[in-house]
Image (spheres, grey):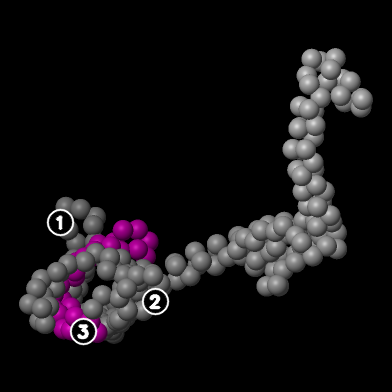
Amino acid sequence: MSPAETKAQKAGRPPNMVEDRRSRLTPILASYQAMGTSMAPGSTASLGHRAAMPGGAWTQTVGGPPSDPFGGNTSGYLDLSGLPNQMLGEIGRRLTPKVCGGGAFGFAGGQVKIPGTNVHGEVLGVVNYDSKSGISAGGIGEVKLFGPFHVGGEVAYNFRSNTVSGEGLGFLGHETASVKLGAFGGGLLASSHGDVGGYGFVGPFGGGGYATLVLADTPCKP
């Protein structure tokens, strides 16, 4: 009688039960032994997984070195070193403006002072040509905020659409007084509609131009 059978009799179990369990476990043990042989270093069988990463795709082979047919990471670890640069590049691309049109304008006017205050500004008549909306005419009012900064707005009638519209304006400019020419100067301007440009003037007359900008992923308005 085998030691297992002797132990089974002492435990009160029949010997055939021990043989039955042994017959069930033998195929399972054989499968694990075969799996261990196939996964040994240098064997042709392998278990792997692949993940699409910024540096490429990688495959980790169990029991062997990692392989990368795409020329990316071969260390067996997820390579995130290029992720910050890719994120910054995508943010920069989305924030890069593109030109969706532009125009030119001419104006005439003069300085005003609000009675009883120290507020100085200008009132101007303006004619504008826009590459999208055509010709419009209206007026601009602006006041000095501080230093070279001025803020104001424009109300204009558009001859193509027969509508009246308005927009906010900001100016960064400088002027110089002249006995012969009067005040002259110029500067930069920006509008609430996304227009960015420049202007110049001599005395009461001036003109300028602008480009209409939008973010890279924003479609241009017709």
Q: Which residues are magenta?
A: 125-154
Q: What amino acid type is highlighted by mark number 3?
A: Tyr
The relative height of residue 143 versus residue 211 in the rendered view (above or below) is: above
Q: Position of residue 139 (x, y in %)?
A: 15, 72
127 in magenta? yes
The one nearer the camera, 19 or 98, is: 19
The relative height of residue 30 versus residue 174 in the rendered view (above or below) is: above
Q: Residue at x 65, y 61 (%)?
A: 50
Residue at mark 3 to residue at mark 1: CA–CA distance: 34 Å
Q: Quadrant of residue 39?
A: bottom right
**Can residue 81 be seen?**
no
Callout 2–callout 1 Cβ contact below 8 Å: no
In this image, 45 relative to 83: left or right? right
Q: Quadrant of residue 163?
A: bottom left
The residue that disc 2 covers is 98
The residue that disc 1 covers is 115
Which is more foreground, mark 2 or mark 1?
2
Residue at mark 2 to residue at mark 1: CA–CA distance: 43 Å
**Can residue 15 be seen?**
yes
Q: Quadrant of residue 2?
A: top right
Main SS, magenta residues: strand
Q: Residue at x 34, y 70 (%)?
A: 218
The residue that disc 3 covers is 129
Residue at mark 3 to residue at mark 2: CA–CA distance: 20 Å
Q: Position of residue 213 (x, y in %)?
A: 35, 74
Dot 3 crowding, Cα within 10 Å, few <14, some 14–19, many 20+: some
